[in-house]
Amino acid sequence: MKVPVPAHIGSIVLVLPLLLAVLQTASAQKNGIQIYSLTVDSKVSSRFAHTVITSRVVNKAEEAQEAIFEMELPKKAFITNFSMIIDGVTYPGNIKEKATAQKQYSEAVARGESAGLVKATGRKMEQFQVSVSVAPAAKVTFELVYEELLKRHLGVYELLLKVRPQQVVKHLQMDIHIFEPQGISFLETESSFMTNELADALIVSQNKTKAHILFKPTLSQQQKSPGQQDTVLDGNFIVRYDVTRTLSGGSIQIENGYFVHYFAPEGLPTMPKNVVFVIDKSGSMSGRKIQQTREALIKILSDLGPKDQFNLITFSSEVTQWKPQLVPASTENVDEAKRYAAGIHASGGTNINEAMLTAVRRLKSDNQAELLSEGSVSLIILLTDGDPTMGETNPRKIQKNVQEAIDGQYSLFCLGFGFDVSYAFLEKMALDNGGLARRIYEDSDSALQLQDFYQEVANPLLTTVAFQYPSNAVEEVTQDNFQLFFKGSEMVVAGKLRDKSPDVLSAIVKGKMHKQNVTFQTKSSVAKQEEEFQSPKYIFHNFMERLWAYLTIQQQLEQMVSASEAESQVLKDRALNLSLEYNFVTPLTSMVVTKPEGQEQSQVAEKPVEDDNRHRNINTGYHLFRQGIGLQGSRMTSNGSGYPRRRGFNKQALPLLPSDPSKSLVHGMEIQNKGPVVTIAPPSAPIQAPPVLLMLPGPSMDRLCVNIKDSQEPMNLLSDPDQGIEVTGQYNTEKACFHWIEVTFKNPQVRVHASPEQVVVTRHRRNSAYKWKETLYSVLPGLKMTMNKTGLLMLSGPDKVTISLLSLDDPGKGLLLLLRDTDHFSSHVNGTLGQFYQDVLWETPEGADDNKRILKVQGKDYSATRELKLDYQEGPPGKEISCWSVEL
């Protein structure tokens, strides 16, 4: 018998929320395995997501082939079911206590049989894989089900689908139904593979409480080129939304004897805070990490509120305080702190214990001296990248010392930079002291990760929040006391209704807000709520009971971290029982996947916990314990887009000169092809692209090419209050392009900051970074952002001016600014470029030819000359145009 050839047939990931679904297959069809149907059906009912992924394949080869089902899912999601249907027979996945599955695994290892680890591929995902041998002409159906409660992050719930089928699929469909009884306040989509050609495959419909997102591309829409099996579907598809809220902030929802209480009041003032930043500057932080830490710290300092107080503590072998006490976040103090932060350099060991105790003593001393404002919130934010090496180095003693010192008075947030730090050590220290831990991944966006974390805790609204329900109405309630509530987050409490509970469920939420105690009251009719959740199209039955079980298990797993040994065992037993009762794959259970006779008889999937995973590029994965023959699947490496990495122009687009195949000319520019890198060597008189290209209003569709000869400071390029648009930038006169350009929209509230390295979009106080030439297709209410493979970023919308930005590939590295649809400018537009859309007079100088003009703008005269320039409105390599060139 021939050994089956491995073929990846479906890596389907749906993460909620991050609700991520990856539909992935490697060149399966080349090995005979063809996917003829691939569907994702996700129902999000009151934040709880139930996802069913179904992949149907057939073996077209004349011999047996190995089909590998591979998928990714979010760390917070629980698998609830997996099955394979082969020749009409169903092979289910059975969820058991972890110890039972571990015994099977240990016996397999003792016999010398293989045990594999399937690694994670991202920051918030875990990877799971199952393989099966498929006979010629046989069909297999894979079905995966998992569930997760969407968490509100900086005011947004997010669903992320990663689409990578790697072959065209006859029936490919994604259905997402969202039902939110509170009402959907906004809904937006974003994709890294969508193009204008795919736009009509996406249908988004929405009413007050429901939304339906359908993506169903045809075979021809999926193809890169006619007749080929290679697909254009390779990237992310994201849905973001939030719900309508009231000042009371409470919403109690009831279904089938269970309730969930969501609490996120609107309109509360931010409480003043006292922040001590504790920054590791040991030798291991040298290089990029300390540079990104300085960058993030400078930005975070700018975001401090006028009523906040702060201090900086840096540590290596020794501990240094910036100031002898906390200081107000005045402009002068913040500027001085920025200069101090800019001078932080890395060297020495890691004395975490002394640094933490210094931070606590600082807060206690200032509080006793009545230097901290009444009703303020005190936070300690620790950033470190390694284990303690100086002073007290025993992690348990450090945790004990810090907990005793803080004594419940302050909240501690621990950020672990990279994988050389013990995350378990930081997590316990944070949870022991009313905070949380977060891993900061070493990447180009590490500074943005730090900034985003700070934004999560930057606006405390309430402290010591307690939920109260009538004792005769509810039982088995999840966590109902919380130390802090931050703007943009949400508190969630769930429980059971008693058999003879009242017809109306009431709740009281108490908390402290600055200098006063506050109380919120909410009521909900049981009968009315039960009726609201009857729509079978949007609701899966008993979802609220499963939501309650999911939330209970998650909280008990978290509480185990800081509980005593006896308490931890009680929590573990209850979480295990719930996991088995509700069929969840959790860190306490495992799923055994059965197979046809003659193949590996079982595979065991275990959900990991966040651990140290030192010196690895991943931090978690699904362990796949295989009994029998070790199976391997081929892998393809790319830059994430499916294409090999490259720089410069696409050589295929360049006409080569027969006399010298290493050179070509594009619009008068000499292109030298040096291996995989294409460089531009300008001839004696190349046609240049202007740094600014303005489409002039009116029927002539004439263009104005603007050069800026003298500017070192940031410029107000244009501002139109009626359009709600503002564009600023800093110009580089030597390179004749921009260092950076920032576009700010008032409605929707979006800021786009472009540099030669990347584009950072800030929305809902959250930063998203995009590299140039990454495909982007984002549709917000009233604004569309697109970027194609040439790197042209376009910002457009109904009745809006279209603003395009382009990063140059040449060694100079700079940005170009392009405007069109400029007839939408209002009469109030102003700025260095905006002035050209006011009353402009054109005059012909006496005796001049048709290529010379004088522009009279707001009392100034500018000489304009008709010249040939390159227009990048459609992206590189550009086209020659004639425009009026002016110099400012």
Image (tube, grey):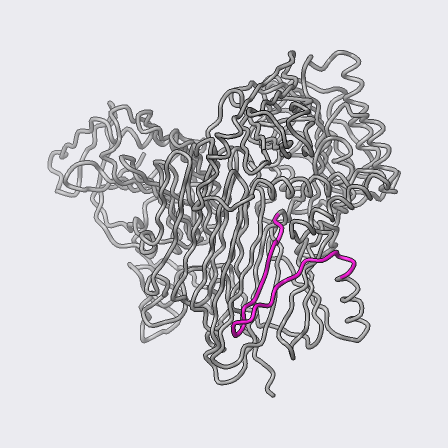
User: How many marks can you see?
Assistant: 0
Where does the image place residue 196, in percent across and percent down from the top left? Answer: 32, 52
Say which quadrant the C terminus sits in: top left
Looking at this view, name the residue that lies furthest to the left: 847
The quadrant where residue 703 appears: top left
Lateral position of residue 510 relative to residue 223, left or right: right
Q: Nearer the viewer, residue 664 or 7?
A: 7
The quadrant where residue 739 appears: top left
Where does the image place residue 298, in percent across and percent down from the top left? Answer: 61, 32
Whether 94 is among the magenta residues is yes
Residue 75 visible in the current orientation: yes
Looking at this view, name the residue that lies furthest to the bottom: 1
Q: Nearer the viewer, residue 523 or 165?
A: 523
Residue 38, placed above or below residue 840: below
Say which quadrant the N terminus sits in: bottom right
The secondary structure making up most of the magenta span is strand
Residue 273, placed above or below residue 256: above
Whether 453 is among the magenta residues is no
Looking at this view, name the residue that lies furthest to the front: 500
Lateral position of residue 31 relative to residue 498, left or right: left
Lateral position of residue 860 relative to residue 161, left or right: left
Where does the image place residue 406, in percent across and percent down from the top left? Answer: 80, 26
Rendered residue at 22%/34% (across/down): 823
The magenta region covers 77-100
